[in-house]
Image: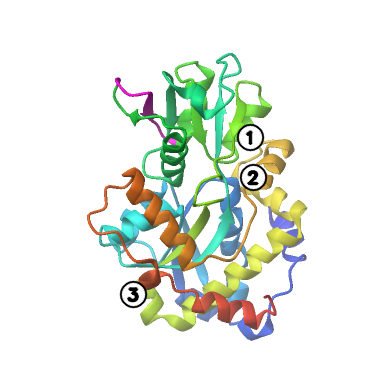
């Protein structure tokens, strides 16, 4: 494993301006919440290069984005990686967070059973569709069903019955023919297709949201009270992301071997990242559009939807990118 890390580290030049002593790194511990998906790999990799940035990162894995929000709300995390829907709902429900960067785009796919005759969204009428509650996939599913003129409920009686399951259980339910289709993340949707028990119906990006951008969020306390440490973290994030964008083989090696312990194939990884490329950037306009779609489709049940310009803060990201010569 050390050899793997050395090989990966060789692919990135770390700025001398952000090299600190190990003692300083030990003092500046950052608690990071993350999810186990291929497109969350660069965020996970931050902890590997953190000492070079003068910080130490403790990564905590969660099953879904709302769990990350709950941990931030409880004061257990400084930074979290999640889909925009969870961040928006979290902010609406009082989570003291700022969106500080994007880290991946896309990452969703509507997958159906090969024997189900489902070729388009309209074919979902009378079917059972699985999705994970509280994520961007639920927002996208509701949006594409609404665009197709289909009604939806988690109880029988509407055009489409939605079954809420954890990401880890959706593929098994499709394989067992307990569901007709799933709105799934990556690399799980690619795995379903590559293993032959799923076929792609669509990538749900033809809505006002477009390709959803995954959000990196910081607690307000960390952002306001530890700005020098927060900037070092953001610089580390940009460096890790640049490596994964520029060096696909390094990204594949880390995600497949370190995150997934060789449980996904090269094809799974390649297909997953093609559908969920890494990025740094996010805009208040994108978050506002996502919020507006959530309100329109009734996703998240927000009594007071947050205004994006109040809590999308990309100044640290821009400072970090500028220091590394990235535009």
Give the residue drawn at x 46%, y 67%.
284
Residue 54 appears in the figure:
no
- Range covered by the magenta-colored residues: 156-166
- The answer to whether the residues at label 3 and label 2 have Cβ atoms under 8 Å apart is no
Question: Which of the two labelled residues, at mark 1 and mark 2, occupies the earlier sequence position?
Answer: 1
Q: Position of residue 147 (x, y in %)?
A: 46, 38
Instruction: Answer left or right for 244 relative to 26.
Output: right
Distance from the alpha carbon under mark 3 to that under mark 2? 34 Å
Residue that appears at 66% across and 24% down: 195
The residue shown at (32%, 24%) is 158
Question: Residue under circle 1?
Answer: 190
Disc 3, disc 1: CB below 8 Å?
no
Coordinates of residue 186 in the picture (x, y in percent) = 58, 41
State whether residue 179 appears in this view: yes
Decide: few, some or many residues near mark 3? Use Cα within 10 Å; few <14, some 14-19, many ≥20.
Answer: some
Please identify the quarter of the rendering in which residue 119 is found.
top right
Q: Going 45% across and 71% down the picture, which residue do you hit?
A: 29
First-in-chain label (3 vs 1) = 1
Q: Return the residue found at the far left.
A: 303
In this rendering, the answer to whether 180 lies above or below 299 is: above
Instruction: Nearest to the eye among marks 1 and 2: give it.
Output: 2
Does the stretch in magenta take in 95? no
Could you give the CA–CA distance between mark 3 and mark 1, rounded to whole angstroms? Answer: 38 Å
**Which residue, as the protein is rendered here, is positioned at the far front?**
149
The local secondary structure at tag 3 comes to helix
The reply to whether the C-beta atoms of the residues labelled 1 and 2 are less than 8 Å apart is yes
Side (left or right) of 191 relative to 225: right
Which residue has dot 2 on it? 275
């Amino acid at each position: 494993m050390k050899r793997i890390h050395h090989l990966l580290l060789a692919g990135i030049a770390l700025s001398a301006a952000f090299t600190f002593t190990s003692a300083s790194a030990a003092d500046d511990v950052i608690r990071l919440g993350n999810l186990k998906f291929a497109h969350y790999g660069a965020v996970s990799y931050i902890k590997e290069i953190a000492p070079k940035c003068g910080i130490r990162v403790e990564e905590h894995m969660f099953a879904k984005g709302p769990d990350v929000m709950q941990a931030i709300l409880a004061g257990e995390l400084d930074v979290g990686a999640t889909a925009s829907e969870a961040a928006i709902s979290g902010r609406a429900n009082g989570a003291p967070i700022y969106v500080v960067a994007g880290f991946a785009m896309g990452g969703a796919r509507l997958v159906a059973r090969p024997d189900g005759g489902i070729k388009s969204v309209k074919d979902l009428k009378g079917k059972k569709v699985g999705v994970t509650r509280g994520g961007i996939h639920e927002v996208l599913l509701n949006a594409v069903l609404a665009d197709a003129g289909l009604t939806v409920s988690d109880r029988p009686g509407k055009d489409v019955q939605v079954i809420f399951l954890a990401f880890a259980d959706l593929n098994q339910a499709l394989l067992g023919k307990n569901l007709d289709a799933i709105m799934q993340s990556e690399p799980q949707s690619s795995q379903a297709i590559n293993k032959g028990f799923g076929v792609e119906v669509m990538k749900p990006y033809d809505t006002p949201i477009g390709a959803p951008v995954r959000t990196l969020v910081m607690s307000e306390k960390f952002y306001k009270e530890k700005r020098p440490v927060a900037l070092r973290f953001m610089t580390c994030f940009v460096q890790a992301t640049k490596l994964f964008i520029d060096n696909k083989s390094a990204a594949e090696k880390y995600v497949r071997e370190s995150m997934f312990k060789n449980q996904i194939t090269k094809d799974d990884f390649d297909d997953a990242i093609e559908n969920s490329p890494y990025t740094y950037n996010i805009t208040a306009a994108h978050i506002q559009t996502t919020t507006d779609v959530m309100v329109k489709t009734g996703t998240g049940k927000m009594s007071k939807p947050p205004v994006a310009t109040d809590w999308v803060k990309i100044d640290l990201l821009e400072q970090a990118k500028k220091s590394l010569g990235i535009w």
